[in-house]
Image: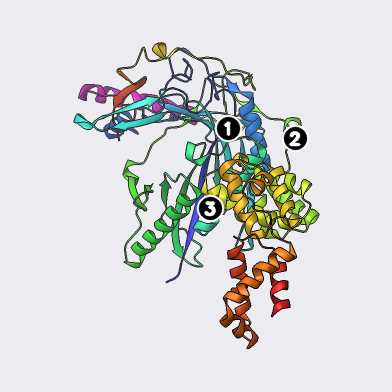
């Protein structure tokens, strides 16, 4: 088992996910299955294969540097949990 | 034991584009909160970022000016972290394939030139601004996303700096280069130029590195130097006391003059970088690089040499004047009107910069236009005013914005060079100070200085000093 429950807990914390003991057990098992499959892929000889940076065969897609008005503030704040002084009001984390 | 510091700097500079890095919102500083935002920079679902071509152009200019190798192929990555300054919960940055690597810049400290390596230059987006408010239950934070998505360049140095003074010189040189390139405003107080430092100490001569700390929150050149001085002393004191430096991120507290622990190694971030699937990679070919290279302006080192070669200025003068593009432009304009370069450089490095600094102004914001400074110098050269009065007039020019000639006229500061008028005052001074006259005649040379001072006082500094000396000596 390459992945322990402790690692699942760490990753869940980083992703701000609250997992029940059952979920932790299930995800540990699933993540291990995925990583075992990665081991299978790792067995392939990829010496002559270019790493894939992107799945689309596109390069150099640019915008010109022109500014345009964005959203009206009321709209921008529509999805905010709380609003104060025209700003997003969130729990203090530091 | 003697210790030496090992310092590397990570500098972030906001690029001077009209629109953000990945959307078309304005980058203007100081707008009402959350008025320069759109679905892309707010991280709403279903949006697609597209890179601003100007960000890559500015990045290339900077990379080439810093003597870097530009990568023929680079891409963007997501740097994941949960903090409300970024609504997407990741920052678009560059990780393993940055825009450019392996450059250098030259600094000069105490007459000694050093070459400081540049590890990498990469493009990324800025985060929003948080204001923390105390209150019950831990308080709350207010978030303004106007700055979110503003393009940044991160410029990372090698750990080649050996003292706070070198770190400051590096930062000043980097700022000068960015300003010459016109890619950033470089206002540290507005946050458009920011700097974090990695610092460790080791016994002098040692080849291995000590445990480093990262110091953040230094918002001026002075703060950078003070914070590093403090942190180096702190680390040395720990080692001297037989302790071990803990790897940590420290925050500089400007008002208390100390660094405090922000987070320890255990709380270190785990960013889980992965390729940004929403942006396609960049391929920068030789033709593009060459075009940007041809368009590079004259940079500080070249301009410094030019001032030395063209005007015969000392290296120190040329270095100070070319430390800012605006200051160098100012110098050029004054010299065009008053061709004594050394006199111009003395005035600019002395009273002019002193008055600018006292007002917290940048050279580009000087209230005295170059033509007016040239006029002032002409007035002095013609003998209309003395050097001492000229200093007063410059001060008045800064304060009122009026021209040199107007001030001299309004305040009646014209130098007294009339032999008869001055002779009368000299006679009065001699008559009023018989003891001093006696002293001088008995060989006390210093007494002359006192008499000159008395004449100056009587004329409120307007007497022509050369003439005063001449008239006094004639009578003594």
Q: Residues within 10 Å of mark 3 (few under 14, many from 20)?
A: many
Give the quadrant of the C terminus of chain B.
bottom right
Q: Which residue is mark 3?
A: B168
For marks 3 and 2, the one nearer the N-term is 3
Q: State the count of labels.
A: 3
- The chain containing the residue under callout 1 comes to B
**Quick one: B255 or A38, which is closer to the camera?**
B255
Near mark 1 (Cα within 10 A), the count class, few <14, some 14-19 or many ≥20, is many
Q: Is residue B442 above or below residue B212?
A: below
In the rendered image, which residue does mark 2 sit on?
B295
Which numbered disc flags the more N-terminal residue, 1 or 2? 1
Please tell me which residue is depicted at 69% across the width and 74% down the height of the picture.
Answer: B472
Q: Give me the disc on residue B15.
A: 1
Q: Marks 1 and 3: same chain?
A: yes
The answer as to whether the residues below labels 1 and 2 share one chain is yes
- Alpha carbon of mark 1 to alpha carbon of mark 3: how far? 21 Å
Q: SS for tag 2?
A: loop
Magenta segment: A14-43
Which quadrant would residue B161 be assigned to in this image?
bottom right
Q: Disc 1 versus disc 2: distance between alpha carbons?
A: 18 Å
What residue sits 58% from the left and 80% below the top?
A: B434
Disc 2 is attached to a residue of which chain? Answer: B
Compared with A85, B194 (above or below) is below
* Residue B202 against residue A80 in the figure, above or below: below
- Residue B329 percent across, percent down from the top left: 70, 43
């Amino acid at each position: 088992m390459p992945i322990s429950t402790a690692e699942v807990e760490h990753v869940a914390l980083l992703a701000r996910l609250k997992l029940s003991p059952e979920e932790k057990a299930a995800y540990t098992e699933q993540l291990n299955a995925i990583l075992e499959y990665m081991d299978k892929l790792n067995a392939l000889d990829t010496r002559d294969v270019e790493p894939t940076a992107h799945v689309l065969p596109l390069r150099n897609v640019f915008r010109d540097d022109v500014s345009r008005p964005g959203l009206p503030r009321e709209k921008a704040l529509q999805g905010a949990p709380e609003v104060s002084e025209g700003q997003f009001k969130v729990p203090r984390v530091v | 034991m003697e210790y030496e510091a090992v310092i590397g700097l990570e500098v972030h500079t906001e690029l001077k584009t009209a629109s953000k890095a990945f959307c078309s919102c304005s980058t203007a500083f100081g707008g009402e909160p959350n008025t320069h935002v759109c679905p892309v920079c707010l991280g709403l679902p279903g949006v697609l970022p597209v890179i601003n071509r100007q960000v890559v152009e500015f990045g290339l200019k900077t990379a080439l000016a810093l003597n870097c190798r530009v990568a023929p192929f680079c891409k963007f990555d997501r740097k994941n972290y949960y903090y409300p300054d970024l609504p997407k919960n990741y920052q678009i940055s560059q990780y393993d394939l940055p825009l450019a690597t392996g450059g250098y810049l030259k600094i000069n400290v105490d007459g000694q030139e050093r070459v400081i390596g540049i590890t990498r230059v990469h493009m990324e987006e800025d985060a929003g601004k948080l204001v923390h408010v105390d209150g019950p239950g831990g308080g709350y934070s207010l978030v303004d996303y106007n700055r979110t998505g503003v393009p940044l360049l991160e410029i990372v140095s090698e750990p080649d700096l050996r003292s706070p003074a070198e770190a400051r010189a590096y930062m000043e040189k980097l700022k000068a280069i960015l300003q010459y390139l016109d890619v950033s405003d470089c206002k540290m107080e507005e946050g458009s130029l920011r700097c974090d430092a990695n610092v460790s100490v080791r016994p002098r001569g040692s080849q291995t590195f000590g445990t480093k700390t990262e110091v953040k929150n230094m918002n001026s050149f002075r703060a950078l130097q003070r914070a590093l001085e403090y942190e180096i002393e702190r680390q040395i004191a720990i080692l001297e006391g037989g302790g071990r430096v803990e790897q940590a991120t420290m925050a500089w507290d400007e008002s208390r003059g100390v660094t405090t622990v922000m987070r320890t190694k255990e709380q270190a971030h785990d960013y889980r970088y992965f390729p940004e699937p929403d942006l396609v990679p960049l391929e920068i070919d030789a033709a593009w690089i060459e075009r940007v290279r041809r368009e590079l302006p004259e940079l500080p080192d070249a301009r410094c040499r030019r001032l030395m070669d063209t005007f015969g200025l000392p290296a120190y003068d040329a270095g100070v004047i070319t430390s800012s593009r605006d200051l160098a432009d100012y110098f050029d304009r004054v010299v065009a009107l008053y061709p004594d370069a050394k006199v111009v450089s003395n005035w600019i490095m002395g009273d002019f910069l002193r008055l600018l600094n006292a007002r917290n102004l940048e050279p580009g914001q000087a209230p005295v236009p170059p033509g007016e400074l040239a006029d002032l110098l002409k007035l002095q050269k013609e003998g209309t005013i003395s050097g001492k009065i000229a200093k007063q007039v410059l001060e008045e020019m800064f304060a009122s914005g009026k021209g040199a000639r107007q001030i001299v006229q309004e305040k009646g500061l014209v130098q007294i060079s009339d032999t008869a008028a001055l002779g009368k005052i000299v006679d009065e001074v001699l008559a009023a100070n018989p003891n001093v006259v006696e002293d001088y005649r008995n060989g006390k040379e210093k007494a002359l200085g006192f008499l000159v001072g008395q004449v100056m006082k009587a004329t409120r500094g307007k007497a022509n000093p050369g003439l005063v000396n001449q008239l006094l000596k004639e009578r003594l």
